[in-house]
Image (cartoon, rainbow, N blue to C red):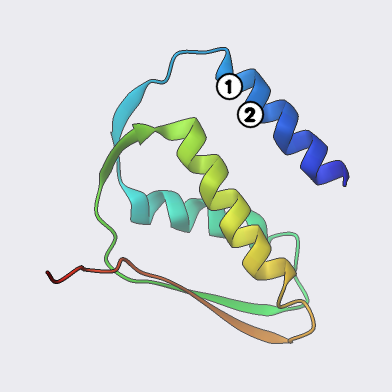
Amino acid sequence: MGKLIEDLLYLSHIGRHEIKKENIDMKQLVNLIFNELIEATPNREIILNSKVLPNAKVDQSLMRQVWVNLISNAIKFTQTKQKTLIEIARKIRTN
């Protein structure tokens, strides 16, 4: 519940600022966040397999929050496993 409240306060804070879009290397951002998050779980083997991710023109702080939430959930919901593989990839649509 505390995490939810923190996230809502963070979004409220961001909502008051102008969105600043910049070109972001998504794979680099994902790897950076993953490395920060696994430091809190030294007793587990958590492997990240990030495929080719396209760069994107986004607000870096908002995109960072998205990745933090997704990756931390993947770590949290696999906590009963000693070894975990997290895969992140893009989906290519064919029409």
For the image, the number of numbered tags is 2
Query: Image quadrant of residue 34?
Result: bottom right
Q: Are the residues at dot 2 and dot 1 in contact (C-beta closer than 8 Å)?
A: yes
Amino acid type of disc 2?
Leu
* Left or right: 17 in relation to 54: right
* Relative height, residue 59 to residue 28 (above, below): above
In the picture as drawn, the residue positioned furthest to the left comes out as 95
Viewer-closest of 83 and 39: 83
Residue 11: numbered disc: 2
Q: Can residue 41 be seen in this view?
A: yes
Residue neighbourhood size for the residue with mark 2, other residues' Cα within 10 Å, grouped as few (<14), some (14–19), many (≥20): few
The answer to which of 13 and 27 lies nearer the viewer is 13
What residue did someone put label 1 on?
14
Residue found 20% across the figure and 68% down from its top: 93
Residue at 73%, 78% in the rendered image:
44
**Residue 22 % position (x, y):** 30, 29
Q: Distance between the residues labelled 2 and 1?
A: 5 Å
Relative to 16, say whether 4 is above or below. below
Q: Residue 35 location, x and y as percent?
A: 57, 58
Q: Can residue 35 be seen in this view?
A: no
In the image, residue 46 sits, relative to residue 52, either above or below, namely below
> Hey, which quadrant is residue 15 in on the image?
top right
Residue shown at the point (52%, 13%) measured from the top left: 17
Instruction: Specify the quadrant that holds the C terminus.
Output: bottom left
At a point 27% along the width and 66% down the height, the residue shown is: 52
Residue 56, picture quadrant: top left
SS for callout 2 = helix
Q: Where is residue 85 in the image (x, y as percent from the top left)?
A: 55, 81
The amino acid type of the residue labelled 1 equals Ile
Q: Which residue lies furthest to the front in this view?
A: 95
Mark 1, other Cα within 10 Å: few <14 / some 14–19 / many ≥20: few
